[in-house]
Amino acid sequence: MALVTGSGRGIGRAIALHLARNGADLVINFFRNRGPAEQTAEEIRALGRQALLVKANVGEIEEINAMFDQIEAEYGGLDILVSNAASGYNRPVLEQRPKGWDWTMNINARALLFAAQRAVPLMEKRGRGYIVSLTSPGGTRVLPDYAVVGASKAAIESLTRYMAIEFAPKNIVVNAVSPGLVATDALQHFESTRQEGILERLAAANPTGRLATVEDVANVVAFLCTPAAEMIRGQVIVVDGGRTLLAGDIN
Ligand SMILES: NC(=O)c1ccc[n+]([C@@H]2O[C@H](COP(=O)([O-])OP(=O)(O)OC[C@H]3O[C@@H](n4cnc5c(N)ncnc54)[C@H](OP(=O)(O)O)[C@@H]3O)[C@@H](O)[C@H]2O)c1
């Protein structure tokens, strides 16, 4: 049984479908958009796997707990947690407000900590487990209007390292995946990625000549949830075609 937070749409949906094709049953979590989540669940059932649909705002601890109560009651255990859901107040540092900080940090970073606290006992029952979080290059580098989301991603990357060490004796593998730009609805929230022709320009500037797709990201997340990845612990795996290796203007 695998839980992917925010799996009705975008990268989360691709991860859920990939895990289902690999034989997992899924918990599909959504917050605002029930329709796409129902459709994702239907596609998973069409693959012959089970799909439990759970509405929960992962920014609220009570809603995380209610989701895990439901998983525990229906399945009694959990093998995989993918902490993918994200939101954020995108604006310059001087325009940030406490509400945006709390909202962003709670959904993106706090959710990982408290979901992991509930996931670990369910994984211990299975004898092993895998936790993968979605972070972004903005956790370590500077993107336009991304200060608070970037801070939340840095927190995710740090938590990933602590959890990898603390959960290792429990046979739970913890890592993070950092995609470069992926064409999902998320790009509509940034002025810089709403510009006409920007995706084509960024694809041309990528060493591979294209942007990473949701499937590229899902492939790596799914790999990190297999015994083949057993000795990769607490790492942030970048999936961007090498884009962030480039030093800037001279490239
Ligand atoms: N796209 C990129 O270029 C990119 C690059 C680097 C990293 N990432 C990371 O990859 C992950 C997925 O990104 P994406 O592009 O697929 O995002 P997206 O298209 O904006 O989708 C966001 C997903 O998160 C869910 N969500 C948002 N707030 C939630 C909440 N409070 N509780 C539960 N679910 C919530 C949404 O569910 P509802 O629709 O139901 O609200 C939706 O399924 C994120 O962690 C993002 O930071 C993305």
Image: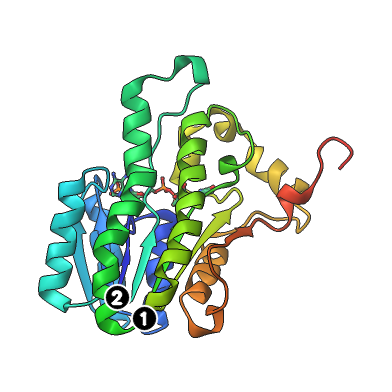
User: Which of disc 1 and disc 2 is earlier in sequence?
Assistant: 2
Q: Which residue is mark 2?
A: 123
* Quadrant containing the C terminus in the rendered view: top right
Q: Which dot marks residue 7?
A: none
Gap in angstroms between the C-alphas marked 2 and 1: 6 Å
- Determine if the C-beta at disc 1 is less than 8 A from ligand 1: no
Q: Is residue 131 left or right of residue 190?
A: left
Q: Nearer the viewer, residue 200 or 162?
A: 162
- What percent of the width, then of the height, locates residue 240? 66, 55
Q: Secondary structure at mark 2?
A: helix
Question: Can you tell which mark lies on residue 128?
Answer: 1
| Image position of 130 (left or right of 3) | right
> Is label 2 in contact with label 1 (beta carbons under 8 Å)?
yes
What's the residue type where badge 1 is placed?
Answer: Arg
Q: Nearer the viewer, residue 171 or 215?
A: 171
Q: Amino acid at mark 2?
A: Met
Q: Residues within 10 Å of mark 2 (few under 14, many from 20)?
A: many
Residue at position x 13%, y 64% in the image: 69
Pinpoint residue 197: horizontal percent, then vertical percent: 65, 37
Estimate the x, y position of residue 162 in percent, counting from the top left: 46, 57
Can residue 166 be seen in the rendering of this structure? Answer: yes
